[in-house]
Image (tube, rainbow, N blue to C red):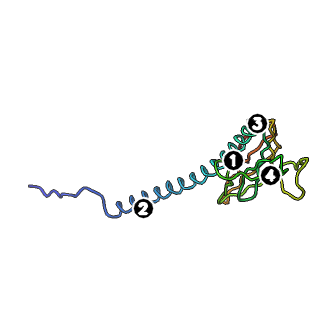
């Protein structure tokens, strides 16, 4: 019988280690991608929430024949109702119009200042006024994240519905 050499078939230890390293790197890239997507989704969700709450307050003002307001500060926002009898703004407490804190994001607002007849001197008024007619102060709110990405713009011309768009 001839001298045939039997050769084992399979993978060497080096080949197995290379495969393990490649799979590990790919898994790490996928996990990092999901974490970034979660933050982006959180940012978009907050922009939508603000826009929808402003629209809901607008509907409430129209239905109840009341003036509503929106306070916007860098790390929080809230709603208020104008009390005609006392001539002042009362912050809305509890429920969907409660004051909301935002984490890892900041708000910047541009809106026209209004003077309301009969307003108590020295009292601050909300930056956005929503009238019982359904009109509101034209505004732009920029929702800026703490991480490197584009911000969201929440805006209304005062007559149209509140819209959101991604800033360039």
The percent position of residue 62, horizontal first and vertical second, equals: 76, 36
Estimate the x, y position of residue 40 in percent, counting from the top left.
Answer: 61, 51
Q: Which residue is mark 2?
A: 21
Among the two numbered marks 4 and 1 on one chain, the one whose residue lies closer to the N terminus:
1
* 8, 75: nearer the viewer: 75
Query: Residues under labels 2 and 1: Cα distance?
Result: 45 Å
For discs 2 and 1, the disc positioned in front in the rendered view: 1
As drawn, is 7 to the left or to the right of 46?
Answer: left
Q: Position of residue 38 (x, y in %)?
A: 56, 52
In this figure, which residue is indicated by the disc labeled 3?
62
Residue count near mark 3 (Cα–Cα under 10 Å), binned few <14, some 14–19, many ≥20: some
| The disc label shown at residue 50, or none | 1
Q: Which structural element holds mark 3?
A: helix
Question: What's the CA distance linking mark 2 and mark 3?
Answer: 62 Å
In the figure, residue 65 lies in which quadrant? top right
Q: Nearer the viewer, residue 24 or 128?
A: 128
Mark 1: secondary structure: helix
């Amino acid at each position: 019988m001839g001298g045939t050499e039997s050769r084992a078939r399979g993978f060497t230890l080096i080949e197995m280690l290379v495969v393990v390293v490649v799979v590990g790197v790919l898994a790490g890239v996928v996990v990092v991608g999901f974490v970034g997507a979660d933050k982006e989704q959180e940012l978009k969700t907050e922009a939508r929430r603000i826009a929808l709450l402003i629209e809901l307050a607008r509907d409430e003002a129209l239905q109840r024949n009341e003036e509503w307001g929106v306070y916007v500060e860098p790390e929080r926002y809230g709603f208020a109702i104008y009390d005609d009898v006392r001539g002042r703004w009362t912050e809305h407490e509890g429920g969907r119009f409660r004051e909301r804190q935002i984490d890892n994001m900041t708000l910047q607002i541009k809106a026209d200042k209004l003077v309301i007849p009969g307003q108590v001197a020295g009292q601050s008024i909300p930056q956005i006024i929503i009238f019982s007619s359904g009109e509101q102060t034209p505004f732009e709110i920029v929702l800026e994240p703490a991480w490197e990405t584009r911000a969201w713009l929440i805006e209304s011309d005062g007559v149209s519905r509140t819209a959101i768009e991604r800033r360039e």
